[in-house]
Image: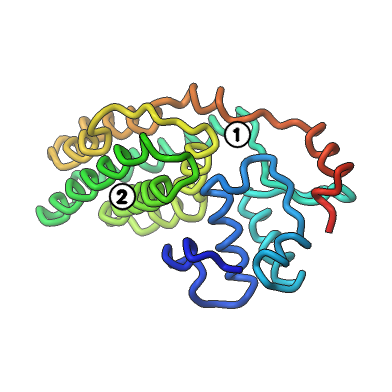
């Protein structure tokens, strides 16, 4: 059935069954419940979510369009495993979009909005500290990822460039960042990592904000690329033989 976690995070409270299935499966992928390369059986998902095959199939098609899952004839569907080159390109895209958000935020944000961003940054850092001693797939990780995405989304929103915020959402830059973060289980951020970024953003210095955002985004990039599992077609074939991908 639809999990309480997804309902609490506002992902599956309304819409069609296909919408609910989409948000629940995506939630499980981003939380690491279904790790990269995990085979996704329509039959199993239908049973777990209490739905028929049709909404599950529609949800998986949407997730494939998003780039989160992949399908092959006679092989089935699995959580997509990105190549190192794609991970690097997504970092580059995020850097381009978010550094521009940082520059515009520095120019356009009001005093109250600057205070808000500093407050959000402190909360994200607090959630991260709680995460350090928690289980990889526990609620602490879910809380951190949710607030982390909200923090960066708010910076883009306060840049006052609507198209820039739309581009971040359309390209799912922050979604893939969360996916890579969970998949690599990176837990080595410096103290006050987000507060330091926020202080640069509210400083009024555009170049300082730009440099801080670039450093923030690229921190640990090489470690993430190294830690994320490499695409392995043999694992897919093994899953098919074991029947994990059928249905």
Q: Would you call the spot at circle 2 few (<14 residues within 10 Å), some (14-19), or many (20 or more)?
A: many
* Circle on res. 151: 2
* Circle on res. 86: 1
Residue 235 vertical placement versus 108 (above, below): above
How far, Cα to Cα, is label 1 from label 2? 24 Å
Q: Residue at x 55, y 45 (%)?
A: 32
Could you say whether the residue bearing mark 2 is in a helix, strand or loop? Answer: helix
Query: Is 196 in front, or is 215?
Result: 196
x, y percent for residue 197:
24, 36
Q: Are marks 1 and 2 in contact (CB under 8 Å)?
A: no
Could you say whether the residue bearing mark 1 is in a helix, strand or loop? Answer: helix
Q: Residue at x 64, y 36 (%)?
A: 82
Query: Is 80 in front, or is 169?
Result: 80
Query: Is 98 in front, or is 7?
Result: 7
Q: Would you call the spot at circle 1 few (<14 residues within 10 Å), some (14-19), or many (20 or more)?
A: few
Left or right of 42? Residue 201 is left
Residue 132 vertical placement versus 166 (above, below): above
Front: mark 1 or 2: 2
Q: Quadrant of the N terminus?
A: bottom right
Left or right of 6? Residue 194 is left
Q: Residue at x 18, y 49 (%)?
A: 119
Residue 178 vertical placement versus 63 (above, below): above
Q: Residue at x 31, y 50 (%)?
A: 151
């Amino acid at each position: 059935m639809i999990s309480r976690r997804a309902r609490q995070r506002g992902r599956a409270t309304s819409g069609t069954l296909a919408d609910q299935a989409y948000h629940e499966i995506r939630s499980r992928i981003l939380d690491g419940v279904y790790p990269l390369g995990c085979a996704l059986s329509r039959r199993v998902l239908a049973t777990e979510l209490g739905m028929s095959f049709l909404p599950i199939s529609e949800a998986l098609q949407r997730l494939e369009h998003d780039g989160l899952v992949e399908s092959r004839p006679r092989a089935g569907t699995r959580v997509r495993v990105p190549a190192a080159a794609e991970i690097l390109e997504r970092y580059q895209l995020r850097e381009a979009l978010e550094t521009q958000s940082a520059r515009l935020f520095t120019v356009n944000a009001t005093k109250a909005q600057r205070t808000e961003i500093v407050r959000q940054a402190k909360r994200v850092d607090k959630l991260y500290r709680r995460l350090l001693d928690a289980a990889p797939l526990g609620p602490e990780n879910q809380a951190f990822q949710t607030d982390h995405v909200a923090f960066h989304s708010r910076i883009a929103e306060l840049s006052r460039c609507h198209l820039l915020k739309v581009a971040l959402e359309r390209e799912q830059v922050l979604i893939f960042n969360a996916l890579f973060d969970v998949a690599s289980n990176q837990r080595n951020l410096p103290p006050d990592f987000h507060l330091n970024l926020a202080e640069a953003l509210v400083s009024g210095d555009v170049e300082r904000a730009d440099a801080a955002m670039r450093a923030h985004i690229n921190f640990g990039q090489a470690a993430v690329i190294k830690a994320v599992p490499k695409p392995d077609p043999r694992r897919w074939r093994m899953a098919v033989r074991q029947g994990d991908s059928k249905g």
